[in-house]
Image: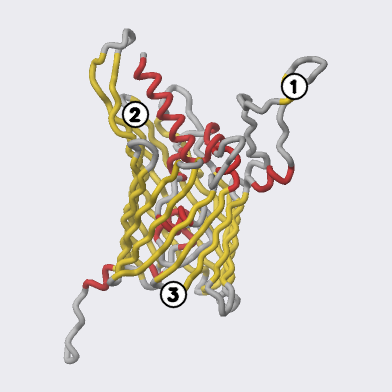
């Protein structure tokens, strides 16, 4: 039936949004969508980019820290067509225990027309994905150079009558050299199990092993980040068998399979981010995702595919972040994020209190 076709299209879309063609090897790839404007603007390279942004804690629990105490974040991004995604989070630091964070992320695909095998309209249905997360992070044995953390996530997906659920764990560790403004982190994301599959086939979750480094220059606002992702799989390249630019063997008439260079295979594992930190109240950001550019950009003119940019500005103690991500020339996704430390709402105590 047509509704089964729509169901297949929806699953393909979630794979596409998560990790382009790599996502086709697993389900629940919507868990990898960037949660905030900052993480999106930096080209999905923020797992070693520590600070106050709760989106970083969602992606890497080792980034949860005392600076996030009593902070809340709301984020929205308008995906393609009528697809919308959002993120809400709150963090609290407990003295002598660590920092905890809870969040909800959703992706709403809207309503679809349902038909029978003859094409007769018989109703409509909707499709949505959810991620419910609880995270914990702390310093290692009171040594603030080392931090660690873990996220527990419950994944819930409903497409018409098809429902799927899964549990996933993230484990992260980080090293902080504050004197040299250098940070390094290792992360394993989405370790878990598909508890209720979409069909009779139990599919894998989108496992992602990452290593990341960030460096802030002294006496200079530039902060740079490099992240290696999907390191558990050496070759994550994808060759488009439907490419228009095909090479033909003149003797046999057969199509010569396209080859991906070693350098290109390596680069598809790497995301880059750069941020000009003028102050805690104003930052300009940019990022580059090579795999996104290679797999989603057109063959001839890729334009700005794979690039992203954004800005963060504080207005009356509210932090506003905006990002624009280019997936295809002329096809952009915008992120809008607002963050606030709820402690700022408390009235100042009288001097004789």
Query: On the rendered structure, is 211 left or right of 328?
Result: right
Question: Residue visible at 28% across and 30% down?
Answer: 111
Q: Which residue is mark 2?
A: 159
Percent coordinates x, y for residue 182 in the rendering: 59, 70
Q: State which mark lies toward you, 3 or 1.
A: 1
The percent coordinates of residue 63 (x first, y second) are 47, 62
Quadrant of the frame with the C terminus: bottom left
The label number, if any, that marks residue 248 in the structure image = 1
Q: Nearer the viewer, residue 73 or 306?
A: 306
- Is there any visible trace of residue 132 in the rendered image? no
Residue occupying the point 49% across, 52% down: 308
Q: Which residue is mark 3?
A: 279
Q: Secondary structure at mark 3?
A: strand
In the drawing, does residue 257 fall left or right of residue 315?
right
Q: Where 2 falls versus 278 (above or below)? A: above
322 in relation to 157, above or below: below
């Amino acid at each position: 039936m047509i509704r089964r076709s729509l169901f297949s299209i929806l699953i393909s879309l979630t794979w596409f949004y998560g990790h382009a063609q790599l996502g086709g090897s697993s389900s629940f790839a919507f868990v990898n969508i960037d949660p905030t404007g900052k993480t999106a603007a930096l080209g999905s390279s923020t797992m070693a980019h520590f600070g106050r942004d709760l989106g970083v804690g969602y992606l890497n629990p080792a980034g949860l820290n005392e600076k996030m105490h009593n902070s809340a974040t709301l984020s929205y991004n308008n995906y393609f067509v009528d697809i919308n995604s959002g993120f809400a989070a709150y963090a609290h630091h407990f003295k002598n225990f660590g920092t905890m964070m809870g969040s909800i992320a959703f992706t709403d695909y809207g309503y679809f027309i349902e038909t029978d095998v003859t094409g007769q309209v018989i109703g409509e249905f909707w499709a949505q994905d959810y991620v419910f997360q609880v995270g914990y992070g702390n310093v290692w044995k009171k040594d603030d150079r080392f931090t660690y953390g873990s996220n527990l996530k419950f994944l819930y997906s409903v497409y018409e009558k098809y429902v799927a659920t899964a549990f996933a764990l993230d484990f992260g560790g980080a090293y902080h050299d504050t004197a040299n403004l250098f940070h390094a982190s290792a992360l394993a994301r989405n370790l878990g199990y598909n508890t209720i599959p979409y069909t009779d086939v139990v599919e894998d979750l989108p496992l992602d092993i990452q290593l990341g480094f960030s460096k802030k220059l002294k006496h200079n606002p530039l902060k740079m980040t490099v992240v290696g992702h999907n390191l558990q799989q050496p070759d994550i390249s994808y060759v488009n068998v439907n490419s228009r630019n095909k090479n033909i063997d003149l003797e046999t008439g057969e199509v010569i399979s396209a080859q991906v260079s070693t350098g290109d295979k390596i680069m598809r594992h790497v995301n880059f981010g750069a941020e000009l930190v003028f102050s805690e109240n104003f930052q300009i950001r940019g990022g580059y995702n090579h795999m996104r550019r290679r797999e989603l950009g057109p063959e001839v003119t890729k334009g700005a595919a794979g690039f992203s940019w954004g800005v963060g500005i504080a207005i009356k103690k509210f932090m506003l972040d905006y990002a624009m991500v280019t997936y295809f020339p002329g096809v952009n996704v915008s992120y809008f994020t607002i963050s606030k430390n709820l402690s700022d709402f408390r009235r100042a105590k009288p001097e004789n209190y």
